[in-house]
Image (cartoon, helix red, strand yellow):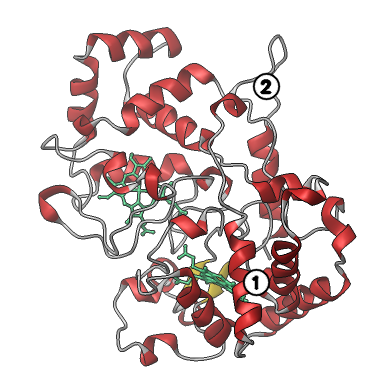
Amino acid sequence: MTFRQLAALAVGIALGVCAGAAAAANADEPLRPLPERLGLDHRKVELGSLLFVDKRLSADGTIACSSCHDFANGGADPRPRSIGIHGAASAVNAPSVFNSGLNFRELWNGSAPSLEAFVTGVVQNPKVFGSKWSDVVLKISRDPDLDARFAALYGDGVTRDNIVDALATYTRSLVTPSRFDRYLRGDTRAITAEEAQGYERFKSYGCIACHQGVNVGGNMYQKFGVMGDYFRDHGHDTPADQGRYAVTGRDSDRHVFKVPSLRNVALTAPYFHDGSAPTLEAAVGVMFRYQLGRTAPPADMALIVQFLKTLTGERQPELAKAAPGKPAPSAVASAAEAAGRSAQ
Ligand code: HEC
Ligand code: HEC
């Protein structure tokens, strides 16, 4: 464990100790509510929603974004590995698309700096869509409805970058406010007393040192296995298990991953980049052992799981719309900035 990680844990534990029940509306809370307004262009959001389910993104017309990001499963893939074109299995479990626009980087190893970078790459990924952009542009522009929508929104009509922009804008709109957001905004009755106790445990045990900010995660990298060798104990050490090492080649980045968001986590089983934990209880147990190096009474684990369930939210498409007659406040940008600021 590095000094920085120790310091992060110490901060988390200190926060847990001083945060009382009255802290709900406190500006110093380590978790932040989702922005109340996104200020996105709703016509782009609508266009992106059509592209998200469009199998023409794939070379052989079999795969859409929605094939692997299932809205009935919190926007994640219930299969431990996703299946792309020609039956290709992904190297890791697909995380949720919900709230992903608020992550400081995309992908488990953080290799995509933005949603735009991710979407540009994924269409050409031979294990996902296996397409050439020129083919996708041609197929989409032959669709009269889509062609007209692009022409109305973008000066240059259907292009790679405009398809990417519509898909990224739609993805940014997929935020899911929950009861816990209401609690953070000061509605102390939005969660039960037990759920609030679970939140206190989440802070006092130090989960908060890594899962923090607006996405309850998604704003820093951390090693998986700070307090023990998860990979040796689980008998696998694949290239995907190397995490950020694959991006930077630095030994200190081996087994380092983006800390995932815990929003909607009750819906997104199986857990971890390798999909190895079938239940939330199992995942929390692994976190205690390998990230905190401690055990907890079953009652405390159960309280934490109860708290995590308050992070289940619902999409609110109207949030994406800008205030009528006003320039759109860039709430997403400022929330992402805030997430970036707290990333050390
Ligand atoms: C074949 C399955 C598959 C398809 C199709 C697919 N994804 Fe994914 N998606 C994944 C997997 C697997 C990951 C994790 C990859 C990684 O981290 O290396 C992922 C990661 C992501 C992420 C990053 C989330 C995070 O927290 O880091 C976003 C955003 C995303 N996908 C959106 C989309 C969009 C938008 C589309 C359509 C353009 C799409 N996906 C198509 C399987 C898929
Ligand atoms: C030192 C940093 C750190 C601490 C402390 C920590 N986590 Fe994590 N957590 C991570 C990382 C990194 C991952 C991703 C591991 C992977 O899959 O590679 C993760 C993954 C998870 C997941 C799985 C999410 C998913 O979508 O797959 C859950 C649930 C979780 N943590 C809950 C907790 C809880 C509860 C605690 C406190 C008991 C905790 N974490 C403490 C860093 C941390």
Q: For this rendering, which residue is in front, 294 or 118?
A: 294
Please tell me whether residue 18 is drawn above or below residue 311 in the rendered image: below
Badge 2, how many Cα within 10 Å: few under 14, some, many 20+?
some
Can I make out residue 283 in this image? yes
Quarter holding residue 270: bottom left
Distance of mark 2 from mark 1, alpha carbons? Answer: 39 Å
Residue positioned 28% across, 10% down in the render: 145
Quarter holding residue 30: bottom right
Residue positioned 42% across, 27% down in the render: 166
Badge 1, how many Cα within 10 Å: few under 14, some, many 20+?
many
Please tell me whether residue 270 is drawn above or below residue 204 in the rendered image: above
From the viewer's perspective, tell me whether residue 283 is left or right of residue 163.
Answer: right
Please tell me whether residue 40 is drawn above or below residue 131 in the rendered image: above
User: Sequence order check: which comes first, mark 2 or mark 1?
Assistant: 1
Residue type indicated by callout 2: Ala
Q: Secondary structure at mark 1?
A: helix
Image coords of residue 177 (percent x, y): 62, 42
User: Which one is in front in this view, the residue at disc 2 or the one at disc 1?
Assistant: 1
Can I make out residue 220 in this image? no
Ligand 2 found in image quarter: bottom right
**Quadrant placement of the C terminus:** bottom right
Label 1 sits on residue: 303
Residue type indicated by callout 1: Leu
Label 2 sits on residue: 328
Image coords of residue 240 (percent x, y): 33, 71
Q: Secondary structure at mark 2?
A: loop
